[in-house]
Image (cartoon, grey):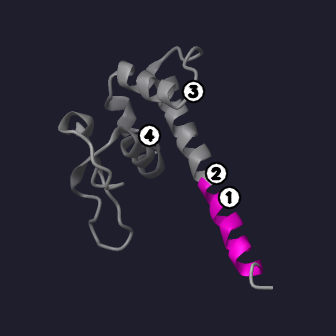
Amino acid sequence: CEHCHNVFCHDCLSLRHELFDGVSAGSGRTRRRVCSYCFFQLCARHCKARCCADLPIRTLRRFLARKGISTRGAIEKGDLVQSVYSWALDLAAFESEELLASARGSVGGDE
């Protein structure tokens, strides 16, 4: 995967998404092969899950099922896309909390 740098077989890297490094101008213009986890994470964080709308419903349901998110109430494809977006927001909030907690621990650990 060109985002997380984990090694996957060719079939597991069938999805492509723009990668944004935040530094280089035009860094997001080229679509790179990424694993499904990184695809959905990038999709939700950088384009508010709009590119997920192009995926088959089965792919969206499988991803959400692997994350333990129920799709029972999802009537339309947009409901599944919204669930992916909500998952990414929850993940970002969790990562922010962990980062803050580790920063607090390293600051107060020298006393």
Q: Say which amino acid is labelled 4.
A: Ala
Tag of residue 49: 4
Magenta stretch secondary structure, dominant: helix
Instruction: Give how far apart the Cα atoms at labels 1 and 4 are.
Output: 23 Å
Q: Residue at x 36, y 74 (%)?
A: 23
Q: Residues within 10 Å of mark 1 (few under 14, many from 20)?
A: few
Total marks placed: 4
Circle 3 residues within 10 Å: few <14, some 14–19, many ≥20 = some
The amino acid on which the numbered mark 3 sits, given as a three-letter code, is Ile
The dot on residue 97 is 1
Distance Cα–Cα, label 3 vs label 2: 16 Å
Q: Are marks 4 and 3 in contact (CB under 8 Å)?
A: no
Farthest residue, direction bottom: 111
Mark 3 near mark 2, Cβ–Cβ under 8 Å?
Answer: no
Residue at the far left in the pictured view: 10
Q: Residue furthest front?
A: 110
Compared with 60, 12 (above or below) is below
Image spot of residue 27 (x, y percent): 28, 65
Pick the front one: 105 or 49: 105
Disc 2 target residue: 94
Q: Mark 4: which secondary structure?
A: loop
Task: Look at mark 3 in the image and give the residue it sits on.
Answer: 69
